[in-house]
Amino acid sequence: MTELIQFFAVLLAAFGAVSLGWLALGAMVLPGECPGRMVIGAAGDAPGLEQAVRGALWLRRTGLWWGEVVTRDRGLDRAGAALAQALAASVKGEQPAPVQEEAPARPRGFVCKICGFIYESDTLPKDYTCPICGVPGSMFERVEI
């Protein structure tokens, strides 16, 4: 029984020596920093994006990993894009840029090429005639009002 314990102790010591050698070799081959890039994909309203970025930053702060954190847009909606932008700014120590509001959809219509009458609608009926000059709908042109 003692021979078995001694065998396992020698095996464990040999494994420890190999591990230390491997670490020393790694330190010689890769001295200093070896930066990497962590790409975090996000979609929709980016559930879990904040936790993933904070985890990567924690790894960087503790020295377990160094490099840059990149968020890849895989179909972010407005809320997700705003969150990603705010996180990117906080990583750089900046204030997040304001989210630009989309311009409201402008109403569309059709204008008569002859008299300038405007028919306000997204579609022009096929049998439509201008109530001012009486020309057919083919004489109307689509416009944004």
Image (cartoon, rainbow, N blue to C red):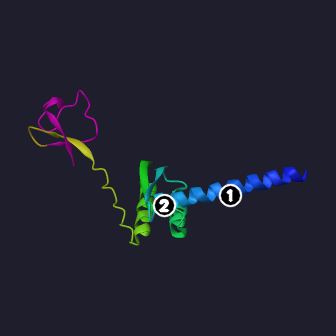
Crowdedness near tag 1: few (<14), some (14–19) or many (≥20) residues, C-alpha within 10 Å: few
Of the numbered discs in the image, which one, if any, rests on residue 28?
2
Which amino acid, by three-letter code, is at mark 1?
A: Gly
The residues bearing labels 2 and 1 have C-alpha atoms spaced at a distance of 19 Å
Chief secondary structure of the magenta portion: loop
Q: What number of labels is visible?
A: 2
Give the image location of residue 99, x and y in percent.
37, 62
In the picture provided, is 83 more to the left or to the right than 2?
Answer: left
Which amino acid, by three-letter code, is at mark 2?
A: Met
Q: Which residue is mark 1?
A: 16
- Residue 64 visible in rendering: yes
Residue at 80% from the left image edge and 51% from the top image edge: 7
Crowdedness near tag 2: few (<14), some (14–19) or many (≥20) residues, C-alpha within 10 Å: few
- Residue 53 visible in rendering: no
Give the image location of residue 59, x and y in percent.
54, 64
- Name the residue nearer the viewer: 119 or 45: 45
Q: Which residues fall within the magenta stretch?
A: 117-145
- Residue 132 falls in image quadrant: top left
- Name the residue nearer the viewer: 99 or 66: 66
